[in-house]
Image (spheres, coloured by chain):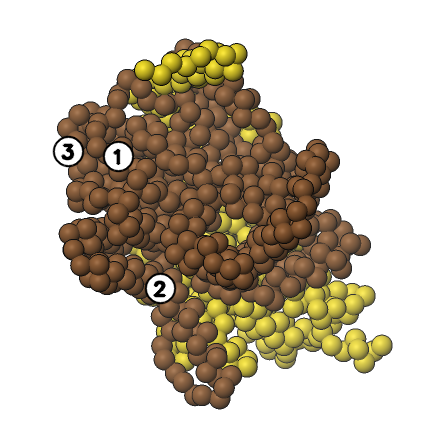
Amino acid sequence: VLFPTAAFAFFFLLLLPLSWFLMPTQSAWRVLIVVASYFFYGWWDWHYVFLLAGSTLANQAFGLAIYRTGSARWRKGLLWLAVLANLGVLAYFKYAGFFLSSALNVLETFGADAAFPIVSATLPIGISFYTFIALSYVIDIYRGDLAPTSLPKFAVFLSFFPHLVAGPILRGSEFLPQLDSPRDPRKVEATRAFFLIASGLFMKVVIANTLATEIVDGVFASPDQYSSLDVLFGIYGYAVQIFADFLGYTNIAIGLALLLGYRFPTNFDAPYAALSVTDFWRRWHITLSRWLRDYLYIPLGGNRGSRAQTYRNLMLVMLIGGLWHGASWTFVVWGGIHGIALVVERRRSDLRRDRGLPEPVDTSRRRFWLRLATFHFVCFGWIFFRADSFGAAGDVIVRLFTGWTAPIEAVSLPVLAAIAVGIGGQYVPRAFWDGLMSWYARRSLALQAASLALVLLVVNVLGPVGVAPFIYFQF
Amino acid sequence: MATQQRTPETTRQTARATWAGRRRDRMTMTAGRAFVIVAVALVAAALLTSESIRSSISRQEGGWRRGAGMALTAPLSAFATALRLDRPREGLLDAFGRERLEGDDTVVTFEPGSAASYGPGAGSAAEDPGEGAANGPPQKSAFAPWDRMRLLAAGDSLAVTPGFAVYRLAEATRVVSAVAPVDGRISSGLARPDYFDWFGHVREELERLEPDVLVFLIGGNDDQDYLAGAPVLVDVGPFGSASWVREYRRRVGGVMDDVAAQGAFLVWIGLPIVRDDARSRRYAVLNQIYRSEAEKRPEDTVFIDTWSLLATEDGGYSDYLPNRDGELIKVRAEDGVHLERAGGDRIARRVLAALRERFDMTSWRERG
């Protein structure tokens, strides 16, 4: 079920009181949440519920086996088995067609006449997210950072519907302790939840969908039809669209979890206010960044080896992170572009330290230029992320420089407003939102409900017709 | 026991912590209160947007979900309308200049005499294709850079990628100009004019933009039982039944006649094979209708078969297909229905070939 639909609203309206009613009886509550989450997942395609259930059973079995095995060798063997099993399933559904077609093309280049069928499997939504969550659970048990939990708790952890299809990518250590005791029904962080849900709906339905339909889809489908200014704002538009889309989903997910009494980690921290690419990755999709850091970068050696090894590790993590987003070489290139930027920034920092040079003076002018440069670098990367081929990305880049005399087709007031809201919103001080929430919290029940209804009405009016799927569902 | 000396800093920290604690207390509420706010807000929003909700549910494919949704929202909508609770939304739509898409289930009608109209004279246009043929093949209309072909691409969401690809390739000939961006309407089709009225929209756009050629790809959402706008007493039955096919054929023929009546040539792009076998079978039924209706109007309409264009050698579906150099490239989107740019380009090449066959797009070079 997509969050911004009447079907989901109905589902949640039934589930919310039932969840709090059963909360004191934790065993019953867990059954309710797992059944509800499987129903939520199966609404899209019930066949894949079995995949989710299979992942739950298999990873719990791996976790228990690793925990109970005394032999270090066996523990390591079991860990590798778990990693291969999880990545194998992911590879089949997500990468089989991509790898097979790439292999066939390489073989043909060398004159080999190979032929094998290309798999065209439907990608189960959310598989990349829950596979990473399951992997972190098993690896944390192997490292001794986490003890296995019971099967019902693990099933809730893996399938809890707010995070199931597009994250945030939870960690056992931050979520499983919340399942140890019933949540307190007297202290629900509802004000924050309402703000998150309302802002999430606005960002997704109004900002992201408006940009997609008004400028981005057209510019990336056929840049030749547009002027350079259209293409430039189409790229800016996509930067805001993907942020608004993913932030929107995450905000709704965190808000729904809060209403049910559970806390999720934050996933974004004003990424377009970043001062460098390194800073950007501390602010963008934070739960993925930390996953890659803890389960890929550090096991590869992190920054413990030579500088060359550190740079290699950074590159590898970004290339694999790129591939995680989609089975296409354009995603790999996107990851590679970011990887190169991270290596360059790291290198500059290393050289400065070697030469004993002081950090540059932090002025507001310097911060402005750094933000502008970082934003445009990130936008350049988004061209490869959004385009479905290198040819398409090249067309966008070429048109950016060759169509300045063409008439402007798509830059309009709604587009400019959506971009301004999407970027400007990241510079609003947190104190403003805190103050607004504080004001809201002091209002009467009727006013609180009425203002929420008003937001829903405005979102309905301003959003384009039809609910486009969230971009990150396909990852 | 260690004691902490109170400094201005610790006093400030304590004050901040206390304030934050109070604020957190104010930010929290009981689960009961939270539920009441959620419930009241959702019910109020449902009443204020009932027509929009009903419209979005009605667009879904047939089945228990749609049935249950329509049954649940019927009293809601009636109640909201009776109390005029739909007015605020209408006011806001007008204030923001937004398009209102939820329409009435009015009967789909066409001009008298059209093959698609009911009553005397119905079917005459389509069943007499030989009139023009008796005079021999018509002379090809010629286009040149100084007298360009006006081209419009339109349809459902499937039309967007090939539509833009057609524009790209056609404009490269220097004798074609797109008259508007690709008019792709998500979730629309000929089955549900209550959601988006393509019949009226095609007439209006042809009148407004006066294209020489309309490239049309539609039907991706039409593989459903329900056909809104069916004439009274016409039972369309389930998808694929003789009565369903008859009514859908009437609509397809009607659009073709409307386009011809406006003096535009219609390139009707058929539906491609898709990943889901059942849906592919349903699309094949629709393609048969499009093809046969186009064949009744050879002077005005051409049908482009995309099925074979996007199927593997053994007739199956694949995300990847070889290009001209034999290299495997991704032609389909992740959903197994929509097209990647390479898939759109494939269709566009065939569309352009059809246009070259129908029109003179090259003699201007000789004429100077």
Left or right position of A472 against A384:
left
Q: At 46% across and 11% down in the image, what residue appears?
A: B6
Crowd rating for badge 1 (residues with CA inside 10 Å; few <14, some 14–19, many 20+) = few
What amino acid is at disc 3? Answer: Ala
Q: Earlier in the sequence, mark 1 or mark 3?
A: 3
- Measured Cα–Cα span from mark 2 to mark 1: 31 Å
Give the SS element for disc 1.
Answer: helix
Q: At 62% across and 41% down in the image, what residue appears?
A: A275
Q: Which mark is residue A28?
A: 3
Answer above or below: position of B344 versus A127.
below
Q: At 30% across and 40% down in the image, what residue appears?
A: A173
Left or right position of A202 against A152:
right
Answer above or below: position of B238 versus B315.
above
Figure label count: 3
Tags 1 and 3 on a common chain: yes
Which one of the lettered chains is coloured yellow? B
What amino acid is at disc 2? Answer: Ala
Answer above or below: position of B175 versus B4.
below
From the viewer's side, name the closer residue of A45 and A443.
A443
Crowd rating for badge 3 (residues with CA inside 10 Å; few <14, some 14–19, many 20+) = few
Residue tagged 2: A91
